[in-house]
Structure formats: structure tokens, C-alpha cells
Image (cartoon, helix red, strand yellow):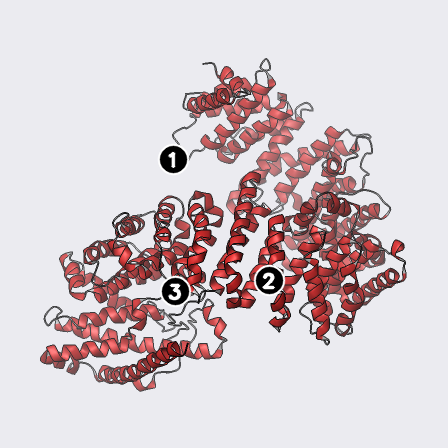
Amino acid sequence: MDLGIILQAALSPNPDERKGAEQRLDEMQYVPQHPVSLFQIIVDTNRDMAVRQVAAIHFKNFVAKNWSPDHHSKISVSPDDKLLLRNHILLFLPQLPPLLRVQLGECLKTVIHSDYPEQFPHLLDWIKQNLQDQQQVHAALFVLRILSRKYEFKSDEERMPVYGVVQQTFPLLLTIFNAFVQIANPSIEVAELIKLICKIFWSSIYLEVPKLLFDQNVFNAWMVLFLNVLESPVPLEGQPADPELRKSWGWWKVKKWTVHILNRLYTRFGDLKLQNMENKAFAQMFQKHYAGKILDCYLNLLNVIRVGGYLPDRVINLVLQYLSNSISKNSMYTALQPRLDVLLFEIVFPLMCFNDNDQKLWDEDPHEYVRKGYDIIEDLYSPKTASMDFVSELIRKRGKDNLHKFIQFIVEIFKRYDEASAEYKPYRQKDGALLAIGAFCERLKHTEPYKSELEHMLVQHVFPEFSSPVGHLRAKAAWVAGQYAQISFSDQNNFRKALQCVVCGMRDPELPARIDSVFALRSFVEACKDLNEIRPILPQLLDEFFKLMNEIENEDLVFTLETIVDKFGEEMAPYALGLCQNLAAAFWRCMNTAEADDEADDPGALAAVGCLRAISTILESVSSLPQLFVQFEPTLLPIMRRMLTTDGQEVFEEVLEIVSYMTFFSPTISLDMWSLWPLMMEALADWAIDFFPNILVPLDNYISRGTAHFLTCKEPDYQQSLWNMISSVMADKNMEDNDIEPAPKLIEVVLLNCKGQVDQWVEPYLRITVERLHRTEKSYLKCLLMQVIADALYYNAALTLSILQKLGWASDIFNLWFNMLQGVKKNGVRANFKRVHDKKVCCLGLTSLLALPAGQLPGDALSQVLRATLDLLVAYKDQVAEAAKEEEAEDDDDMDDFQTDDEDEDGNGSDREMGIDAEDGDEADSSKIRKLAEQTKTFRPNDEDDDDDSDDDFSDDEELHSPIDDVDPFVFFVDTMKVMQSLDPLGFQNLTQTLEFSYQALANGVTQHAELRRGEIEKEKLEKSSAITDS
């Protein structure tokens, strides 16, 4: 069938016909010369424009996918077709209408990024030739813009080709630009061409200014033109009346790109201290001749809005950014000072005030008003944000000159407002004044005489606006109150009054006021020293939250809810189920909105993440009430099931956190929860390998808390499933060492939790562990793999040793292990097995070897094992003691924080009775778990460095409950030695008597410490038993 007919059918209103055409087009991708056929239809002027457009879209998508295909692609474009298409795209581009040119431009972008300069050497000649042809200049600029953009963010060697492009094209661009600027009544088409020149210049100078522009004459010629464009009034003729269309009009775009360029140059060269020697002379020239001129131009530009003229928001924002950057530079501030008062009070402050556009949006689309007010991206374009930033920078850097003056100005506004009758009150100016007071809160909180007047200011000028007839002032009052919630109130009634007003604001008839009240409430909850201020109204607060969550998707709502839950902890138990149900419902609404909008930064998607995070906070707050988790499960299970598939990639980490809580704190793991295991395994195998450390936590919970089900269930077979996943990961030669670290940790979980019940898996797991060990480079992974050997020895020393001997690996493995145990860094501290847990596992594994029947290990090997075990026990004791000291010095809450080894610490002999200096270490061997999800952070290594220090920043990540938590390595060692002594007295005597005196002393010290630990363990058991009885 003719390709044109198929494309025509793809436009059919009949869905079946359209679907059939699209399937046929997919099949035709494999036909030789398919892209050439599509291109022929695009350039065929006899074809219907709609068909040509469909062809152009398919051509663009085909080129994007198949011009430089990855190894998975079954389609590739032949070299002959590529050559033909490169030449013909350039040939036809100038002739095509804009709709088709845009699509072909995207194709050309793909081609240039892939082929230039090696396979597309004549492109630059084509550009130069067409820049000199008046009829083709637009096409040449269009292509040059694509080419320059390829190098916009490239640096060093990757950037080299752009220097040749600049050297050969900029002289021509300068001539063209100059000619355009001379035109008396330029058309809108000229604006489009100047805009392209500006974009080319921008891309070429973004990271580094090309050497050609270091020539002062050349640079001056460009700057004269840019300043000319900046100073020239925008033509009135043809300017759209609609503000949305006006800001996108060609001549305003030219202004915007000119300001962009001048700001970029100032950012790069405005501070001489930041320049290298090569750039310093150029920077001095730029500052001397141009920085001040740009400042004057910008002030003149802003003066337009002072007298009621128009400037696009983005231009105002960029100009104010330049002025903000100028404040700290003496010469620029001196130049600014004569015009500063006019700028500050007649331009900048009015921009901070509530305006007609704000009112229109407030009235017509309050949801959008809220979104814009809380959207960081909007701040990049907002004149109001840029004005606040300017005043904040002025107060911060030049406060001595300006703070008092500006505060006096604000006080005058407050005074005029208070004195005016209701119909003449300057409501919008009061809004701007409150915004300024809120924006300066940090400075005013710490500066007298303002600091001592803040409470009075709130009572006199902010509190009354909670009952203002004007909605935006009620909203602003809530926001300002939130900014100052943390101050020390001399009259606690004022704090209560503010809190009550903010809570009442959650029922305001205007949505933006309700949201600002919620935002402020978070600050009051955080500042509240007596929770009885909030406790009585908690049910009412939660009701208001649920109403708002039904009305709008806003992550600040969820943040405030999280703060309340965090603050009240277990007191949230009566509300926990209702909270989870409402958050789950809100989550589904947010996801539906996000899917419908298909926007990555959609507020619904952000709020969805917030809902899941809040659910986690609730689960944590009631973690001591396991029966509640049974009630949560029906609500949360559908979320977990759906979001552990590809549908949940954006929220996968948050969902895994919930799964971790549900599998850890529930009384038992239900069969419904077990149904999530296969979903996680499928995700890991398919796309979720980056989340392996996060998945490790719930998998550990399943195995350690549902051991019987893990071992006995055959449909599905969880043991086989785990083996399939771990063996696949460990055997994958393309996976980096960092990526597979959770795998050996999971093997450890199996061996420690299933002791004596998984003999059939010991050999397979040992095989893949040793095979991976042979090609492992990272020391941290080597330690983890060697710990699997230690775990296997602790599991069953005789079985493990026989397997290693059968496979011919025993000698090599033990030699490597002992070498790693003896390895030290340049500063003398231990290079391997640095965590408390590492040392404990090694101690238990080595000690298990000592319990083997006589003759299974040669005497010299036994002696080596004993020495290594004693050294490890000493190191273990010192590290635990060091961690205990740290714990005493810190707040209890800090124990959940990420702690690191300090390799500069020398240790100071904390174990004098054993005669050994302590090695470095800040690790805690705590088995308690309060923030389960935070373990996933410590599961993840620092993968930026490849040297031996790359794994230093780890705390013990095995804060999960483990069967070896209750095994004391000293007691285990001494009991093992006693068994050995009773079973083989002669062997025991030979072993101990051949030890050096220092090791005999160590052995005595270990024995004494073991008895001390026995007493402590008994005492701990009694205390625990007594606590349970009392409760």
C-alpha cells in the first residue's frame, strides 16, 4: 500500500481505521529506505498539508529513535540514506513552511548531535554560504542555532569544535546584526532573525567566552549592538493587546534574550576575584566599559513601568537579578546610589504589592493562584520574587544605609493604612508592606531596635488583618504570623491568639487564605512548647485538613500534617486509621490528576509523594502499637500492589518505605503482604536495580520475621525466587561493585535467620560469592563477600569448610581473609571490616572454626585463626566503647543519624586491660530500630571514589533485628574455647601454649571481659523482664 494513503488513513476520524494505519506505519519502519520515503512526502508540495505534517512527525520520531540506535534497536539507517537525508534536509529546509520546518529542525538537531563534525563536515560551509544569501539567511541562522546549542553545556575537549564555528561565523553574524539594527522601521520578521542571533551568541558564550571575543574591538562591536537593542523602544505597531500574547511577541523576546546575554556576561565577569589569570584582563575591561552602562540601561528600562508602561515579567525579573548582583560590588553600588530611592520606593516596592493580575487570578482561578504562589519554577519568572530578593540583598549587604530607611517607609504605610477610612485604605500597599516584613524576618529577629518590637508589630499591624474584609490581606497576615511563630513571646496569650487566628484561617471562605493558614500552622506547631495549646483542637484540625485535601493537591498541606503527626507521636493513634484512609484517598486523586496532566512537575505528582511520606510518618508514630498495622493493611495494600509495578516508578522509594514499616511492625506478615514479594522481584529484574538498597529492607523483614513461611512455602517458592535474583545480580559482569552490595547482605540474612534449615543453599551461595570475590575491586564489597564466608562458617563450620575444600578454594580464601584482617591504611588504622557488625560477623565465623573436631584444621591454621579472633575481639570492644562515649555525648535522637568513621582519630587506649590501643570508629551496634526507612540511606555506599577510602563513611547498616544481636562474641568465644578444652585437652594446651605472651595476655583479658558481659547480659534480661511485668 502507498505510504501516502497510510498517512492519510492515520488522520481518519474513524478510530479503527486510524489504529490500523498506525500499526501499518510501525510495520513499515523495517522497510528499506523508509525514512527517505517519508522525507519525499514531506517536501512534496502537491500533497495535502495535513499528510505532510503527519509524515514530518513520523519522520522526526523515526530519526530520533533510529539515527543513532542503541544495541536493542532492530532498525538502523544505512550510510547512503543518511548521506542523502543530510544533504536534502539542508536543501529543502529554507523552502518549507514553519510547521514543517520545526519538525525538520528537530530531526536536524538529532543528526547534528550525532554526526557533526565527523560525518557532516560540509555543514559549516553550508551555513557560511547561506548567511551571505539574503533569501537564505533565516534558514542559515536556524541551523546555526541548532549547531551552537549542541555545545552550549559542553566543556573542555568536547567544546573544541565550537571555537571553529565562532571563528568562521561570528564576523558574518556581526555584519548581519548591524544591518538589522540600522533598519528604520523593522518588521516582526527582523525581530525573529535578531532573536536567532542572540540565541546563537548565548549558546556560544554560556560556559566559556570564545577567544575571538577577547579582542576588545570585536567585543565592543557586539556590545554596542546589544545596548542599542536594549535602549531602542519596542515598535508599537503590531504589538498584541493580550498580555499573554504580548510577552511572547518577537520584539519583547529580543529584549529578553539581550538581557539574558548581558546578565550571563556579568555573572561570569562581574567579580574579578573569581577570574583566572587568562580572563582577568577581559573581566577588568568588561567592568570598566560595560557593567555600568548596562546598569544605566536597566534602570532606564525599569523606569518604563514606573510611568505606567509595559515590560514582560521575565525581563523585569532578569533586570532585578542584575541589580541584586550589583549591590555587593562597590563601584556598581556607588553608581546605583543616586537612583536608589526612586528604584526602591517607586519601582521595586510597587512590584511587591498585590496587583490587578493577582486579583484577577485570585477571583477567577484560586487553585492556579495557590499553585503559582508555591511553585519554585514560577519564582524564576516572577517580578515579585525578584523584587523581594533585591530588597533582601540590599538589606543584607548594605543594611547600614538602607534598613532603617526601608523600615521607616513600611511604618509610614502602616500609619497611612491605620488612619484611612475603610473605603480609602491602601490594601494593596499594606499587602506589600507585610510581604516585606515577612521576607526580612531573619534580619529583624536579630537586629535591635526591631527585635524587641516584633511582638508589638504583630499585635498592632498583623493580627487585625486576620479579620480584614480583603481576602489577600487575611492570607498575608497568616503567612507573616507563620514567619514569626518562633520568636519569644513576652505574653503567651499573643502566641495563642496568633495560633487561634491561623487555625480559624483554615476555614476562610477564600482558598488561598486557607492554604497560607495551613502553611503558617506548620511553623506554630514546630514552635509550640506546650502541646496543650493544640491538643484540644486536634480533631478539628484534622477535619479541616481532610476537607482541604479533598479540595486541592498541595504538598505543603501534607508537610504540615507530617509535622503534626511527628510532634504528637503515639497520641495520633486514635486518628491514625482515619489519617491513613484520607491520605490514601488523596494519593489516588493526586495520581489520577498527574496521569491526566502527564507533567513531570505537576503539583498532583508532588502531592502524591507527600501523601506517601505522611503515611510513613504516621506508621512510624504508632510503631509501638502493632495491632493498628492490621487495620492499616486493607487501605494501604492496593497502593503497594499498584505502585510496586512500573506505574509507581515516580513513588517507588516512598512505597518501599511503607512496605518496610508494614512488614516490620505488623504482629505477623499476612499472606496478602507476602503477595508483594514477587512484585519487588519482578521490578528488580526489570527496571528497579537502582532501588536494590531500598528493597533490601522489606526483603530482610520477610525472611527474618516470616522465616517459617519463607522456608515452607512452595507456591511461590521464595527461596528459589531469592536465589534467582541474587545469582543473576552477582553473576552480572556489567554491574558495578556498588550496585550489588545488597546481594551479599541478603545472603547473610538467609544464613543467620535460617540456621540449620537451608543446608542445600550453602554451596550455591558460596560458589557465587567466591566467583564474584575473584573479580571484585571495591574493598567494601570484598568485605561483604568475605562476611558471607564468615556467616556460612557460623551457620555450619564443618559443612562450609568441606565445600570450600571440595571446590579447592579453602587455602586461597583463608589467606585473603587473613590478609584483609591485617590490612591497615597509611595512618595505621584498619583498612577492612571497619564497622562493628563486620567485626562481630568475622569473630563469630572464625570462632566457629575453633569448635571443629580435632584434625579438621591443621595446627598452624588454628593458631592463625585464634590470633585473628583475639585481635578482632579487642578491636570490637574498643569500637563499641567509643560508640558508647559518643552516644552519651549526643542526644538520644541523634542515634538514628548517619554516623561516620573518623579515620583521623587515633584512639586512646580504651581497653587498657587488654594492652591494645583502640582503632578508629564511631559505629554503634544498636539493634533498636526507630526509623526503618532511613536504613536504606546507610545501605547505599559512597560510589564516587574508587580508592580504598570510598567506603569510610558508613555506620552500621544492620540496625535491623538479627539473630546475632543476642550473641555476645566474647561469651561465644570463651564458651567455644571451653568446649574445645573439654573435647581435646591436648590440642587446646598445644594451641594456647604456643601463643606469644601478648596473645596469652589478650586471651586472659577476653576471658575476664566475657564474664563481665555475662553479668551485664543477665542484668539486662532481668530489667527487661521487670519492665514487661510492670507494663
Where does label 2 land, which residue? 539
Q: Amino acid at mark 2?
A: Pro
Mark toward the start of the polypeptide (2 vs 1): 1
Number of marks in the image?
3
Q: Amino acid at mark 1?
A: His
Number of residues whose C-alpha sits closer than 10 Å to that of mark 1, classed few (under 14), some (14–19) or many (20 or more): few
Front position among marks 1 and 3? 3
Residue 534 versus residue 658 in the image, above or below? below
Mark toward the start of the polypeptide (1 vs 3): 1
Q: Amino acid at mark 3?
A: Asp
Q: Which mark is residue 788?
A: none
Question: Visible in this render: residue 326?
Answer: no
**x then y, percent, for residue 564:** 58, 63
Number of residues whose C-alpha sits closer than 10 Å to that of mark 2, classed few (under 14), some (14–19) or many (20 or more): some
Q: Are marks 1 and 3 in contact (CB under 8 Å)?
A: no
Work out how far the residue at label 3 is from the one at label 2, CA to CA, in angstroms: 38 Å
Work out how far the residue at label 2 is from the one at label 1, CA to CA, in angstroms: 56 Å
